Image (cartoon, rainbow, N blue to C red):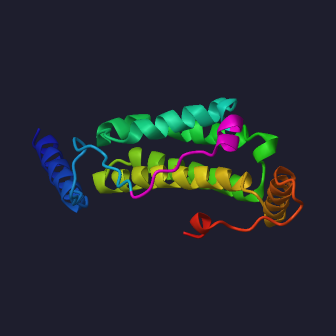
Amino acid sequence: MRNILVIFLMLSLLSCQDEAKKPQVAPVQSNTTFADSLKISKTRSVALSPEARTVAADWLAYITAQNEIGNLENKTGTEIIESSNNLMQIMENLRETLPDTLRTNAVEARTNVLLTKALVLHQYATKKQKNPDEIFEVAENLVVEFDNFKLQLNELFLKTPENFELDLDREFEESLEADSTGTIPLFKVEDKI
């Protein structure tokens, strides 16, 4: 009986020593909490050009991504964590379903950036010790990158200098046709002001 008691005491001491050796995890230092809402600093707001909007209107993945990014604003940290998996899948779908009319290196690079940001957000959301500052920062970056993506889409439909010159020539020819005298129209005094 005495041997059993000695063995029991030895095991108790060993288990106490194991617990003492475990490293203590420091709590995460954060300026925000998961109950706070995401505030997006809107220094710019990007709207699609009419030509880009026409193409994007038929692209279901874009519409879904735009709605999800728009819904990020004012979400709490907890809600962002819960939607991180959806965001990751939406951005992957956006990249994979890119229409051929938009398939350029620049647009593909922007979709890769969006997917990467969504993957980082998902990674932070699945960590054991989540940091609200990291979650909010990546979520805000995702919104900014989506605006950059929209800018890139708009750039696809900008007129090239050659097209701009052709438009100016066409407008000049039309102004000559409107003037039956056949002379080059001069600017009026009001036009110079």
Nearest the viewer among 45 and 101 is 45
Q: Residue at x 31, y 46 (%)?
A: 38
The range drawn in magenta is 43-55
Classify residue 116 as left or right of residue 9. Answer: right
Task: Please name whichever residue, 13 or 114, is drawn nearer the observer in this view of the structure.
Answer: 114
Q: Position of residue 50 (x, y in %)?
A: 65, 41
Residue 105 at what x, y percent from top left? 76, 58
Q: Is residue 86 visible?
A: no
Tell me, yes or no, whether the highlighted magenta stretch contains residue 184.
Answer: no
Seen in the picture, residue 81 relative to 25 is either above or below; the reply is above
Q: In the rendered view, would you say 150 is above or below 35? A: below
Q: Position of residue 148 (x, y in %)?
A: 56, 56
Quadrant in which the C terminus appears: bottom right
Quarter containing the N terminus: top left
* Residue 58 seen anywhere in this rendered image of the structure: yes
**Residue 54 painted magenta:** yes
Residue at position x 54%, y 46% in the image: 47
* Vertical order, 98 against 60 (above or below): below
Above or below 183: residue 141: above
| Residue that extends furthest to the right in the rendered view of this protein | 182
- Quadrant housing residue 98: top right
Name the side, left or right, on which 150 lies relative to 179: left
Count of marks placed on residues: 0
Foreground residue, 57 or 133?
A: 57
User: Quadrant of residue 18 in the image?
Assistant: bottom left
Give the left or right position of residue 31, taking residue 144 as reference.
left
